[in-house]
Amino acid sequence: MQRKLKSLRALNGFTQLDVASNLGISETNYKLKEEGYQDFKVREIKLLQKLFDLSSCEVGEMFFSNGD
């Protein structure tokens, strides 16, 4: 998940601070989540889905599967 999310963020031209602001969390908290040290809350996943225009299938693969 970490590599996919980081790549998606970079492809969309967002910094970690940009995404953190969209989620209403600190940049440090976002970094920990992006690097896999903390889990995203359901509310945050929904916001990421909207921000990156992800399908439900893409969200499932990114956040709810065992693969990276």
Image (cartoon, rainbow, N blue to C red):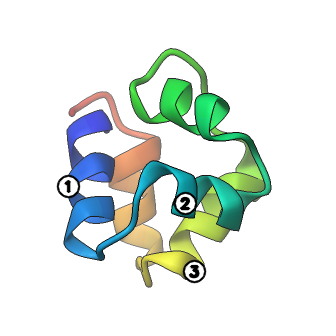
Task: In this rendered view, identify the residue nearer to me: 59 or 5.
Answer: 5
Q: Residues within 10 Å of mark 1 (few under 14, many from 20)?
A: few
Of the numbered discs in the image, which one, if any, rests on residue 29? none
Could you tell me how far apart the alpha carbons at marks 3 and 1 are, in whole angstroms? 16 Å
The amino acid type found where label 2 is placed reads: Val
Q: Disc 1 marks which residue?
A: 7
x then y, percent, for residue 5: 33, 50
The image quadrant of residue 59 is bottom left
Residue at left offset 50%, top offset 15%: 37
Q: Disc 3 marks which residue?
A: 50
Q: Is residue 6 left or right of residue 25?
A: left
CB-based contact (under 8 Å), mark 2 and mark 3: no
| Callout 2 secondary element | helix
x then y, percent, for residue 6: 28, 48
| Callout 1 secondary element | helix
Q: Earlier in the sequence, mark 2 or mark 3?
A: 2
The amino acid type found where label 1 is placed reads: Ser
Q: Residues within 10 Å of mark 2 (few under 14, many from 20)?
A: many
Could you tell me how far apart the alpha carbons at marks 2 and 3 are, in whole angstroms? 12 Å
